[in-house]
Amino acid sequence: MTLKVERASAYLLLAALVIAIHLLSKIASGKTPQSAAFLSQPCYVGIEGLVKWPGIYGFSSPPSAWEVIRKAGGLREGFSVMRDFIGNQPLCGRAVIVSLVSKGKGALSIKRIDAFKRISLGLRINLNNEPAEDLVAIPGIGIKTARAIVAFREKRGSIASMSDLVSVPGIGTRTREAISKFCTLAGGPER
């Protein structure tokens, strides 16, 4: 009986030791529980081209292009990229493209992640800077209403509040409420 208790205590002590080592390694690397806190909305970054595992990856804080490349398994064998090519541009809601420019040499560029992919990831679509073709990704918005939103925005300069949307032909109170969870009016990049 005491052997079972001793064994259970040993396993419990081992589990506590593993957790303590994990936390200490996070603190030593500068990732304290406060700095490792998740954003209110995760940062998703896509990567395409000359990487081992192209796709869309989630980050708890905005990454550098090199962090995205590392998460995608690194560059394919035999390729290299100039390190300072894109600098510190914000990458949340965007995709990094690693393309071939000459034998063994790649270049980085950035584009927006497709609006339909952003919606499926739970990212909001910015009504103040998206073209009509991207606004149709919002459930309940067709091309006619999307074009009306763009025309309204161009006429007024920007959409100041979600309540302004009821002035757009094709959008009433019910539609505004339904689409509000998919939209933002913020000027910065979506996370």
Image (cartoon, helix red, strand yellow):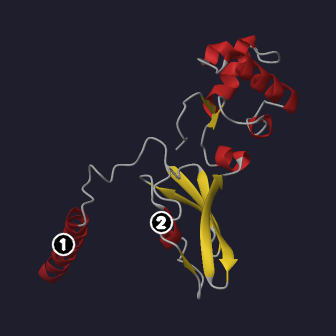
Please give the residue where the numbered disc 2 appears in the rendered image: 84
| Sequence-wise first label, 2 or 1 | 1
Quadrant of the rendered image containing residue 36: bottom left
- Residue at the image point whose x is 69% and y is 25% from the top: 178
Relative to 103, is 169 on the left or the right? right
Please give the residue where the numbered disc 1 appears in the rendered image: 17
| Residue furthest out toward the bottom | 78
- Distance, label 2 to label 1, CA atoms, is 41 Å
| Circle 1 crowding by C-alpha within 10 Å: few under 14, some 14–19, many from 20 | few
Quadrant location of the N terminus? bottom left
Frontmost residue, 175 versus 148: 148
In this view of the protein, can residue 173 be seen by the observer?
no
Residue type pointed to by label 2: Asp
Total marks shown come to: 2
The answer to whether marks 2 and 1 mark residues whose Cβ atoms lie closer than 8 Å is no
- Residue at the image point whose x is 26% and y is 49% from the top: 34
Q: Secondary structure at mark 1?
A: helix
Q: Is residue 11 positioned above or below 24 on the image?
A: below
Residue 74 at x, y percent in the picture: 53, 77
Relative to 188, is 49 on the left or the right? right
